[in-house]
Amino acid sequence: MSEEENKPKRTVRITLDRKFGVSEAPERRPRRNDDERGSFGDKPSFRGDRGDRRFDRDRGDRRFDRGERRFDRDNRDENREGRPFNREERRGGGRFDRDRRPRRFGDKPFNRGPRGAMNAPVYRQRPEQKEAIDENLDEAALEARAAQIEAVEDAGSTPPWFKRLIACTTEKGREREGKFLGEGVHVVEELVKHHRELVISVYVVEGFENEELIEAINEAEITLHTLTEDQMKRLSSTMTTQGIIAYCNIASKKPVYETSRSVLTLVDAVQDPGNLGTLFRTSLGFNSSGMILGRGTVSPFNPKVVRGSSGTFLRVPFEFDVDLVDQINFLRSKGYTIIATDLHAKQSLREIPAHKLRKMAFLVGNEGAGTNPYFIELADETVKIPMSSELESLNVAVAHGILSYEAAQIQEELK
């Protein structure tokens, strides 16, 4: 035997302290009964160095014992105060709903889409509005109302003076009586201030409170009458009255064509009273020499035209129910350049030679059909308003306003 084999063998005993890299097979624990078993999904427990488990299920005094913890499944339908939860309340505004959790700077709000999707885009919408009601009564409604009043056989129930007022709410009645009605505070102020000679009388509703206007009417020595609410509604061309109406004679000033050095407007079959009222206001604003209303154009004494112009239509010289063919030839003989608006025109107003723009007469047409092609053929020049190709045409009142402004600038430069 070798010397190494004869040496005595030594046994080294090492006590392991269960540190890193050392493990022992776990002791087999006895099977627990049903009362000791955990529910499905419970995590296994681990013993520490001192043998006390942090979350030992076998201990009855553990911190989150199933029988005592706040959010026990058996007590899930009750909140802290013991009040039963409403499911809708819990879903929409419960204490632990994600939408109600504390937000920090930079957090995005939780927005639910139609199917509960989070962070869906929010679209700001206007509040729902009631359907707009037309404040104006149409001509047919006014005609029917006047006919109903005239058909009353008992003369005592409807006095003659009131019948005359009712007649002025229709086109036929205005032509027969030779009178028109100016309705509204601003219209009456304008008529009393600038056309006192045309105002026959003024009617106000009981309790009318504009003392300043009442004083102006009295100073102008205009007769003032009082109407009931029902009578005022029967005279008004709107759903809501302002409580005052002037009863006036039909009259107008004729344009002075020979000495005029400004712009005239020829109106071909414009039928919207609001548009015609705006044409009058624009003409007054840019010192127009006057307006010529061709046949088929709404009457300038229509209550809606009077109101649309705020009563200023009488300050613009005008003729109405005119044959435009004869008028175009007449104006040309007086040195006017007839300029028609046309979508197919190749030039703007400023591209016309300057000597033709000293005396201008614009020809504007119907809202839907435009200017009569025959009148366009009679015109000396056709112009277009430069604008985006996305839009086919402009409203007649808007187009007239643009041309009137440009014409005023051109004539100022030519002085």
Image: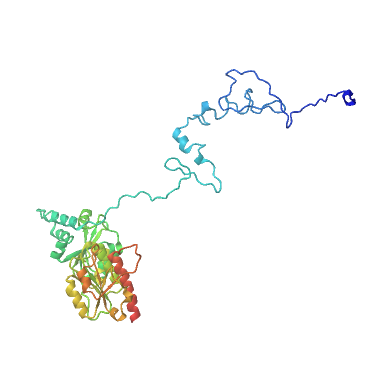
Q: Compared to 51, does 231 lie above or below?
A: below
Q: Is residue 353 left or right of residue 233?
A: right
Q: In the picture, residue 308 is in which quadrant?
A: bottom left
Q: How many dots with numbers?
A: 0
Percent position (x, y) of residue 124?
Answer: 42, 50
Say if residue 411 shows up in the picture.
yes
Q: Position of residue 374 (x, y in %)?
A: 19, 70
Q: Quadrant of residue 188?
A: bottom left
Q: Is residue 360 above or below residue 148?
A: below
* Foreground pick, 206 / 229: 229
Q: Quadrant of residue 309?
A: bottom left
Pinpoint residue 25: horizontal percent, then vertical percent.
69, 24
Residue with the most extreme front position: 1
Q: Quadrant of the C terminus?
A: bottom left
364 in relation to 89, above or below: below
Residue furthest out toward the right? 3
Note whether residue 215 is visible.
no
Q: Farthest residue toward the left?
A: 153
- At horizontal 50% and vertical 41% (from top left) the residue drawn is 99
Point out the image quarter for the N terminus: top right
> Nearest the camera: 323 or 168?
323
Query: Considering only vertical position in the picture, is 317 above or below 127?
Result: below
The colour scheme is: rainbow
Which residue is pictured at 13% across the width and 59% down the height?
160
Q: Position of residue 84 (x, y in %)?
A: 47, 30
